Amino acid sequence: MESTLSVEVERKFVCDADIQKQLEEIGAVCIGQKQFKDKYFDTPDFLLTLRDVWLRCRQGCWELKCTTVTKAEDRGGEPQKAELCSRYQEITNLSQIQLKVREVMKEGNGEQTSANQMHPVVHQDTPKTEGAENCPTGNESWLRELNLVCFAEFTTQRCSFTFGGEGDESGVRVDLDQADFGYCVGEIEVLVPKGEDIQSALRKIEKTAQRLGLSGDQRVQGKMDVYLQRYCPEHYAKLLSAHIL
Ligand code: V4E
């Protein structure tokens, strides 16, 4: 994450056993491996995530991902393929994050009805993660003030690849992620400074996907989809009903 305001355009894919070899064959270079722990926060009635707003602390750094313009606006000429890609604005400055969270909550509280008020959060046997102890415990004052609690916590081992030169894949990054609850997923992503051209990012992602022989047109589940499905089924069901996941 390089700037406080940028749009991350990405396509997830299912990794098969020889993905690393395939990446090397198309000129990708491994730029390193790392491990990080994510803690995601929301109100007990899911005010943020039901608006597709994702607040997390990764290794002690706060990040907020939220939807950008409607997908139709930046879809370009290839509607079906572009739908495989998601785009989220990323905010990494804590004051901007707090401002945005308050804004979303204000809108959400205006809409709230008795039907979606305060349900106990049921977590089913969530996995234990090791290390990364610099993540917050959830009792920071702004979290308490906004009634934000941790709803998901997991550790990822990530291997990242980029492409050298000025070719079709410049600026494209491929991450291979393995979450500690036993789920692996790949992501082809381009970070676009806010206001710049999303379509070029979509084309680059499509080109990389083609070169990797990714033919499927099904949406691939992210780590969060699988985590919530397994450990927080009530939250998962609400996000599915709201067409967020
Ligand atoms: C936006 C979002 C979530 C936040 C985490 O997003 P994701 O990119 O899956 O995680 P990760 O660890 O790869 O983050 P990175 O290191 O790339 O910043 S959790 C759920 N969503 C919503 C969502 C969606 N609706 N559709 C898709 C394809 N992905 C995520």
Image (cartoon, rainbow, N blue to C red):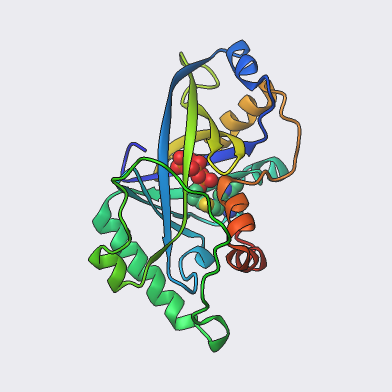
Q: Residue at x 50, y 22 (%)?
A: 161
- Name the image quarter holding residue 184: top right
Say above or below: 124 vs 221: below
Say above or below: 139 vs 203: below
Which one is nearer the viewer's eye here, 149 or 202?
A: 149
Q: Residue at x 61, y 25 (%)?
A: 208
Say above or below: 71 vs 131: below
Which one is nearer the viewer's eye here, 27 or 165?
A: 27
Say above or below: 137 vs 38: below
Position of 190 compared to 76: left or right? left
Q: x and y percent of residue 119 in the render? A: 52, 78
| Outermost bottom residue | 114
Quadrant of the drawing holding the C terminus:
bottom right
Q: x and y percent of residue 156 in the render? A: 48, 38
- Name the image quarter holding residue 177: top right
Q: Can residue 157 be seen in the rendering of this structure?
A: yes
Q: Can residue 200 be seen in the rendering of this structure?
A: no
Q: x and y percent of residue 95 in the render? A: 24, 58
Q: x and y percent of residue 223 in the render? A: 57, 46
Q: Which residue is drawn at 41% across and 41% down?
A: 130
Q: Which residue is drawn at 62% across and 11% down?
A: 25
Quadrant of the drawing holding the N terminus:
top left
Count of numbered tags: 0
